[in-house]
Amino acid sequence: MVSLTLIDQPKHHSDFKFGFEAKELPIAEPTASQTLVKVQAAAFNHRDLWILRNMYPGIVMGSTLGSDGVGIVVKNGSQSSSFEVGQRVLINPGVNWESDERGPEGDFKILGLLPAIGTFSESLVTESRELVPCPEHLSTAEAAALPLAGLTAYRALFTKGKVKKGDYVLITGIGGGVALFAMQFAVAVGAHVYVSSGSQEKIEQAKALGAEGGINYKDPKCIAELKKMLNGNQISAIIDGAGGPLYTQYPKVMRTGGIIVNYGQTAGVEGVSFTMGHVIKNIDLCGSTMGSRREFQEMVAFVDKHKIKPVVSRVWQGLTNENVAEAIEMMKNHQQFGKVVIEINGSASPQLHKL
Ligand SMILES: NC(=O)c1ccc[n+]([C@@H]2O[C@H](COP(=O)([O-])OP(=O)(O)OC[C@H]3O[C@@H](n4cnc5c(N)ncnc54)[C@H](OP(=O)(O)O)[C@@H]3O)[C@@H](O)[C@H]2O)c1
């Protein structure tokens, strides 16, 4: 079977520290508690860029990349008959986090860095308990787009941000995968959603999906502009994946006791500012990372209930070095609006068909 492997040569992007190569690897057999899944499609996350740039902890050469995937059950281990052979399943991108709201109980791992096997592969073996039946309304690419970004958005918005109907919410960097899910989920519960982006075109796309307004984070006066748009209403939660200089201004548009949830720092790795302006308004600043298995199951049920369709920016057919290089280039240049997906199933190894 072909798998996308992390290598120590930046073959396709000279500005990265590491590279990738589609390589032939043996198919693993599931142990008693595991299931073998034929991957139909996998999606990229910003995490994959951080890994290639050597800006991510725990990098292991030879890892199969990818945290997002949808596939078909091929074979169950002797004690894992919870899924029918042929059933379409989503793969939980996290391992060893059952249900504790505060954070992982165990040694948390994310698919895509060894010892956790990644999804950019014709097949993968995972613990059966990490699989969830895939909602029927999702296409293959939409399903692949959902797991990591959907889970991160769900926890950030609901568990940490406590967003509910009628709340005013700001979601930053709306072109991003997590941000778009956060917006769709917030709209689905009846919140008033405002977004930020570096692109007016993306703000308009977000408005077409239910956002009430948007600001350009590159404009230093954008928070004053947001205040005008809010017309006296105040933000209850900011769901932010960027960090950056606007943090000092956020209290100006937030209600007392508002919550800022930070799940990423794309704008810079030097951290975020928490000032007396936040303290005086009793604002909570929370970090949030992905989510538990329980939150993953809840998120998939939420997507099914509200028939949410993930926003897919572009889909490539086939797990080839050229397709991966193009997809990475698109993300590197922030050209995407939504998720970047590779459909894999078409050329699956003959051995896999025989299993
Ligand atoms: N903690 C976790 O569990 C977790 C999970 C997933 C992701 N993350 C992190 O969250 C971030 C986003 O991940 P992703 O996969 O959704 O990324 P992505 O799809 O690659 O999107 C990144 C987005 O960041 C936005 N951005 C860039 N500079 C910005 C700025 N100065 N202010 C506001 N937004 C800015 C851009 O939005 P526009 O295109 O609209 O300008 C871009 O589309 C990354 O840092 C990632 O590592 C963390």
Image (cartoon, rainbow, N blue to C red):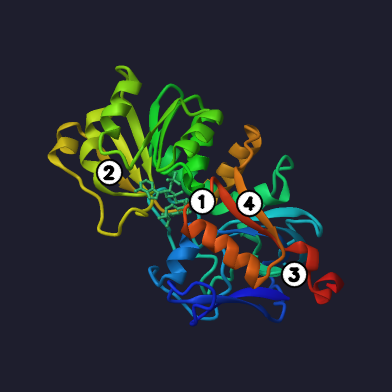
Residue type, label 2? Leu
Find disc 1 in the rendering and name its residue.
335
Of the residues under marks 2 and 4, which one precedes in the sequence?
2
Q: CA distance from mark 2 to mark 1?
A: 29 Å
Residue 94 is at least partly visible in this image = no
Q: Looking at the image, which is closer to me, 203 or 296? A: 203
Of the residues under marks 2 and 3, which one precedes in the sequence?
3
User: Residue 225's image quarter?
Assistant: top left
Give the foreground label among 1 and 4. 1
Find disc 3 in the rendering and name its residue.
78
Judged from the image, the secondary structure of the residue bearing numbered disc 2 is strand
Q: CA distance from mark 3 to mark 4?
A: 38 Å
Q: Are marks 1 and 3 in contact (CB under 8 Å)?
A: no
Find disc 4 in the rendering and name its residue.
314
Of the residues under marks 1 and 3, which one precedes in the sequence?
3
| Left or right for 161, reference 341 | left
Q: CA distance from mark 2 to mark 4?
A: 34 Å
Judged from the image, the secondary structure of the residue bearing numbered disc 1 is loop
What is the quadrant of the C terminus in the image? Answer: bottom right
Q: CA distance from mark 2 to mark 3?
A: 46 Å
Residue type, label 1? Gln
Find disc 2 in the rendering and name its residue.
285
The mark tally for this picture is: 4
Of the residues under marks 3 and 4, which one precedes in the sequence?
3
Q: CA distance from mark 1 to mark 4?
A: 10 Å
How far from the left and from the top, in percent, is residue 208? 55, 29
Q: Does the numbered disc 1 mark a residue whose Cβ is under 8 Å from ligand 1?
A: no
Q: Are marks 2 and 4 in contact (CB under 8 Å)?
A: no
Give the foreground label among 2 and 4. 4
Residue type, label 3? Ser
How far from the left and from the top, in percent, is residue 4? 62, 73
Give the foreground label among 2 and 1. 1
